[in-house]
Amino acid sequence: MASSRLEKIGTIVTRTQGLLRSGAMKWDDRPLWYDVVQAFPPKEEPRFDRPPSNISVRPVFYAEDTVRAKFHKQQNRYLTNLSDARNKTASQHFIAIYNQLQQQGALDEEKVFEAAQEMLDEKLGQLKLEKTADSTAQEQQPSTIAAKHVETKPAKTVQLQDIFKE
């Protein structure tokens, strides 16, 4: 079994067992999943010829999915950095604003959407200004600290003759 690469001949578990028994694979080199499958074997053997289970997949939708879809359909100018988990995305800011306006209940859905877009532009503009202000403050701060440090402590001059005096 171990010499064949066809998925029709044995399962991945039986093929791995064959490799371990024959010595073609060392016990220390066994895959991570092997011990898990041995401890918790599947209810049905995972074979290629097994018919698929007849389980319907339930749709998973959240209340804000329609708003988010409409936002992304109309606004494709916002970029999202998926590796930045600290800052909220534009769509997250938009949905928060949209939900606040909708809870107030004074406007219909279209006007809430338009007002949320305007408020989002203002909020993102403010966040951008704050980030630039913070970055310029951080750039200027070390130079002012160094300047204060230099001003408060006068520099010492060391004479070479003083070092070698006895």
Image (cartoon, grey):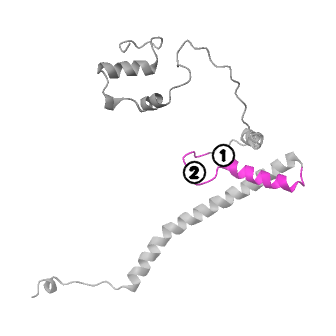
Give the farthest residue toward the left: 166
Taking depth in this image into account, of 74 and 10 the one nearest to the observer is 10
- Residue contact between numbered discs 2 and 1, judged by CB atoms under 8 Å: no
Query: Which residue occupies the foreground of this view, 161 or 16?
Result: 16
Q: Earlier in the sequence, mark 2 or mark 1?
A: 1
How far across and how far down the image is residue 42, in percent?
53, 25
- Mark 2, mark 1: which one is toward the viewer? 2
Per the image, the residue denoted by label 1 is 78
Q: Nearest the camera: 143 or 9? A: 9
In the rendered image of this protein, does residue 52 appear above or below residue 110? above
In percent of the image, x 45 and y 71: which residue is there? Answer: 142
What's the magenta region? 80-107
Is 25 positioned to the left or the right of 75 in the image? left
Amino acid identity at mark 1: Tyr
Distance from disc 2 to disc 1, alpha carbons, whole Å, reads: 16 Å
Q: What residue did someone put label 2 on? A: 85
Residue drawn where x is 81% and y is 48% of the image: 113
Q: Position of residue 4 (x, y in %)?
A: 39, 12
Q: Callout 1: few (<14), some (14-19), or many (20+) C-alpha neighbours within 10 Å?
A: few
Q: In the rendered image of this protein, does residue 143 appear above or below residue 19?
A: below
In the picture, the disc for residue 127 is none
On whether residue 93 falls in the magenta region, the answer is yes
> Left of 151 or right of it: where is 73?
right
Percent of width and height locating residue 31:
40, 30
Q: Secondary structure at mark 1?
A: loop
Residue density around tag 2, few if under 14, some if 14–19, many if 20 or more, within 10 Å: few
In the rendered image, residue 152 lying in the magenta stretch gets the answer no
Q: Residue at x 28, y 84 (%)?
A: 156
